[in-house]
């Protein structure tokens, strides 16, 4: 995977833990697709509506709606954030197939890989 | 039966709570400050009626802050515009003043919400610029509900769980007077027991500078010289932001829960100029008819009015038209009620201005005073026959006529009366 330009959106990650920002920079600078996971999980926790239960022990099995209190708008917000961050497009069909953090992570990694593969 | 006002909340350039607003009105203390927009010191607009204690300049809600004591959860913030923050604070104050809590509104089919704002030009611009930067491929999912005209009613209704009437009004600077008028009508018709009327506007480059390009804004740099309604040297309005909320109730509903009526919403009227898109009829023809219709609706004669809360924004054309209309309704009959233009103190809050004046009228009635025109030096010739006190008059008005005018020649007037005959 070819290195990509320095992060345009790293300012958006300023509110996240340092290791998330580092992971994103690893992805941007070294093309480390494995680093995507940390960013996706942090974003999924961040974008949950406030009324939802506190996120503890988020795993691949954690469900966005049932466990994190997501509604359809919050899902759209999270997707917009990830699309902009990773500069790819997640379709409505993709979103409908995502129920868990694991589904989302796999979806983003697939999209990122397709993008870099095509470039 | 006419509705009564049972609560008022203020986020304004002259104060962020009822006591400080009342004190500013009594003292003639303005809330206009020096400003610089877009980092451009060369812009001719030097002052504005700023809202203090809030940080909402950023287009990103995560950057915003507001005074302590207001509860605005994250899932509300994400769809909100900056003026929505002001509005929630004003509504919370008004509910508390009325002896109500948010739980009294939630799911109550007899409570309606009537809102007015111009939307958020800043967020609209920011969100669409984001969309255009990626050639339309993506955008903020909450961009629409946070920015278009109607954002106030969408968000407040969801936040306060409104289940009665829900509507928004877009008649520019007459908008919140329309909101108030139709709320009054729904209460009079028995469709609801309670109405929340809210106006709100933000103050930033995107909301204000387009008016400079219309040549509608004052270019004075001294606040006292910039906003001086009815003055011979006035040169335009001073932009301002904020939010005001009123709680209106059917008198029986207010009495049933032991709420104190602060003022009676005695009547309202409207009429249009049929003239220009952005200039008043030179003799204020529509405004005169709107005043007469409001008086008739309130079953009041011109001689029953003690105070006229003028719309006067400090523009050459608008103030002149209003002065002539007031003279026609009152002066031509030998009547000289006190006329006060509070935009001298606040600046012009655009679609918020009608309900802001209504809130000030409630304070005048409950506090027993009539705000003056402290920035007025020499009154313009067309004000001949108007009683324009410079200082606040320490006398309680029994009835007030409050004027609003907006683009397209929309004119809306309200009559407020001391709540005689009501218990409490």
Image (spheres, grey):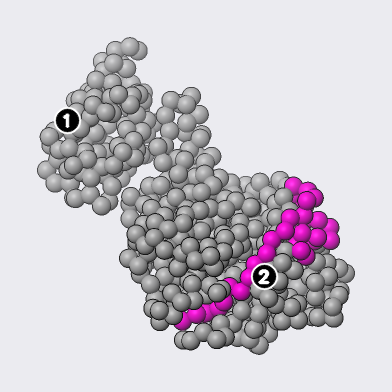
Q: Which mark is residue B404?
A: none
Q: Which mark is residue A102?
A: 1
Give the camera-side residue of B327 and B131: B327
Q: Which mark is residue B297?
A: 2
Magenta span includes B285: yes
Magenta span includes B192: no
Estimate the spatial distance between the alpha carbons at disc 2 and disc 1, rounded to whole Å: 65 Å
Q: Which chain is mark 2 on?
A: B
The residue positioned 53% from the left and 53% from the top of the image is B168
Position of B111 compared to B360: left or right?
A: left
Image: B170 above or below B51: above
Q: Which chain is mark 1 on?
A: A
Give the camera-side residue of A48 and B54: A48
Asked which quadrant contains residue A111, the reply is top left
Residue B327 appearing in the image:
yes
- In magenta, the rendered stretch is B260-289
Image quarter of the N terminus of chain B:
bottom right
Asked which quadrant contains residue B346, the reply is bottom right
The residue positioned 52% from the left and 57% from the top of the image is B115
- Secondary structure at numbered mark 2: helix
Image: A44 above or below B23: above
Give the percent coordinates (x, y) of residue B263.
Answer: 55, 78
Q: Are marks 2 and 1 in contact (CB under 8 Å)?
A: no
Give the tally of numbered discs: 2
Q: Are marks 2 and 1 on the same chain?
A: no
């Amino acid at each position: 995977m070819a290195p990509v330009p320095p992060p345009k959106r790293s300012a958006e990650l300023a509110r996240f833990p340092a290791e998330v920002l580092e992971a994103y920079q690893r992805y941007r600078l070294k093309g480390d697709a494995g680093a995507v996971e940390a960013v996706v999980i942090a974003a999924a926790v961040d974008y949950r509506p406030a009324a939802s239960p506190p996120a503890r022990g988020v795993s691949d099995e954690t469900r966005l709606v049932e466990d994190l209190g997501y509604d359809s708008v919050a899902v759209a917000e999270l997707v917009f954030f990830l699309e902009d961050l990773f500069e790819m497009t997640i379709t409505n069909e993709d979103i409908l197939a995502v129920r868990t953090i694991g589904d989302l992570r796999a979806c983003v990694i697939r999209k990122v890989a397709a993008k870099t593969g095509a470039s | 039966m006419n509705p009564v006002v049972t609560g008022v909340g203020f986020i304004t350039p002259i104060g962020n709570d009822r006591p400080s607003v009342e004190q500013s009105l009594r003292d003639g203390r303005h809330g206009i400050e020096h400003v610089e927009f877009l980092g451009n010191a060369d812009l001719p607009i030097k002052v504005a009626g700023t809202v203090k204690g809030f940080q909402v300049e950023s287009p990103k809600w995560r950057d915003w802050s507001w005074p302590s004591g207001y509860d605005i959860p994250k899932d509300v913030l994400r769809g909100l515009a900056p003026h929505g923050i002001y509005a929630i604070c004003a509504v919370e104050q008004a509910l508390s003043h009325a002896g109500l809590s948010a739980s009294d509104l939630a799911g109550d089919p007899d409570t309606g919400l009537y809102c007015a704002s111009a939307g958020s030009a800043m967020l609209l611009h920011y969100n669409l610029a984001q969309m255009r930067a990626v050639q339309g491929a993506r955008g903020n999912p909450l961009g629409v509900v946070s920015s278009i005209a109607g954002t106030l009613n969408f968000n407040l209704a969801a936040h306060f769980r409104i289940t009665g009437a829900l509507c928004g009004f877009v008649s520019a600077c007459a908008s919140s007077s329309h909101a108030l008028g139709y709320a009054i009508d729904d209460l009079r018709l028995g469709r609801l027991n309670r109405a929340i009327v809210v106006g709100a506007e933000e103050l930033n480059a995107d909301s204000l500078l387009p008016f400079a390009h219309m040549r509608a804004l004052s270019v004075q740099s001294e606040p006292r010289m910039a906003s001086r309604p009815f003055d011979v040297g006035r040169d335009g309005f001073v932009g301002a932001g904020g939010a005001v909320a009123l709680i209106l109730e059917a008198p029986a509903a207010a009495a049933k829960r032991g709420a104190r009526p602060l003022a009676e919403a005695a009547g309202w009227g409207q009429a249009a100029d049929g003239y220009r898109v952005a200039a008043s009829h030179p003799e204020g023809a529509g405004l005169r008819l709107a005043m007469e219709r409001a008086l008739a609706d309130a079953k009041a004669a011109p001689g029953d009015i003690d105070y006229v809360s003028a719309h006067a924004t400090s523009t050459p054309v608008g103030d002149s038209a209003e002065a002539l209309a007031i003279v026609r309704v009152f002066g031509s009959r030998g009547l000289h009620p006190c006329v006060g233009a509070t935009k001298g103190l606040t600046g012009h809050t655009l679609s918020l201005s009608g309900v802001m004046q209504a809130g000030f009228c409630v304070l005048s009635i409950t506090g027993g005073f009539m705000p003056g025109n402290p920035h007025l030096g020499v009154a313009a010739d067309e004000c001949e026959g108007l009683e324009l006190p410079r200082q606040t008059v320490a006398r309680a008005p029994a009835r007030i006529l409050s004027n609003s005018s907006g683009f397209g020649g929309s004119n809306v007037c309200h009559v407020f009366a001391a709540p005689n005959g009501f218990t409490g």
